[in-house]
Image: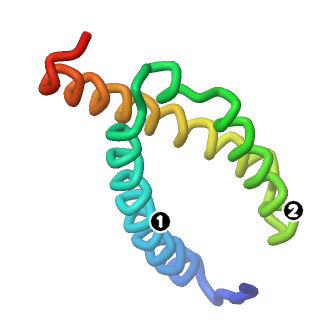
Amino acid sequence: MDVRCNSLNEVRENIDNIDREIVALLAARGNFVTQAALFKKTTSEVKAPNRVEQVISKVISLAQEQGANSAVVESVYRAMISAFIEAELKEHSRLNENRGEP
């Protein structure tokens, strides 16, 4: 996507539109993260460091394909995944309390 803007205001409007899309996608991703907690038996499964590295590797490749800054994409994904893991751990704990499990 190569949109050329004619003003800073136009740049900001485009960024605002992208932010709306990103937040909607984060909400959808969060929904799946919540569902994933249902299928995981242990906190180790929630943390899943091998899966984290698979995702990071995949998005770095996608960034390169799309001409995005790979370092920025990696940093954003690591922060996002960390936040989602924390949310999933809370959900996992809540589910286990409701099931009467330790």
Q: How many marks?
A: 2
Residue 65: % across, % down: 86, 69
Q: Residues within 10 Å of mark 2 (few under 14, many from 20)?
A: few
Depicted 80 relative to depicted 23: above or below: above
Q: Position of residue 70 (x, y in %)?
A: 81, 52
Q: Is residue 100 left or right of residue 24?
A: left
Which one is nearer the viewer's eye here, 9 or 41? 41
> Callout 1 environment at 10 Å: few (<14), some (14 to 19), or many (20+)?
few
Q: Residue at x 16, y 25 (%)?
A: 99
Q: Which mark is residue 75?
A: none
x, y percent for residue 95: 22, 30
Give the x, y percent position of residue 46.
Answer: 47, 29
Secondary structure, mark 2, is helix
Disc assigned to residue 22: 1
Describe residue 32's horizontal placement relative to residue 18 as left or right. Answer: left
Where residue 88 sits, quadrant-wise, is top left
Above or below residue 86? Residue 22 is: below
Question: In the picture, residue 11 is in which quadrant?
Answer: bottom right
Q: Type of residue at label 1?
A: Ile
Mark 1 or mark 2, which is nearer the start of the sequence?
1
Q: Residue at x 73, y 36 (%)?
A: 53
**In the picture shown, does residue 8 fall above or below 5?**
above
Residue drawn at the location 68% of the way across and 40% of the way down: 75
- Amino acid type for the residue under numbered disc 2: Gln
Q: Nearer the viewer, residue 18 or 102?
A: 102
State the CA–CA distance, disc 2 to disc 1: 19 Å
Q: Which residue is mark 2?
A: 64
Quadrant showing the N terminus:
bottom right
Left or right: 56 as drawn, with respect to 85: right
Q: Is residue 47 above or below residue 33?
A: above
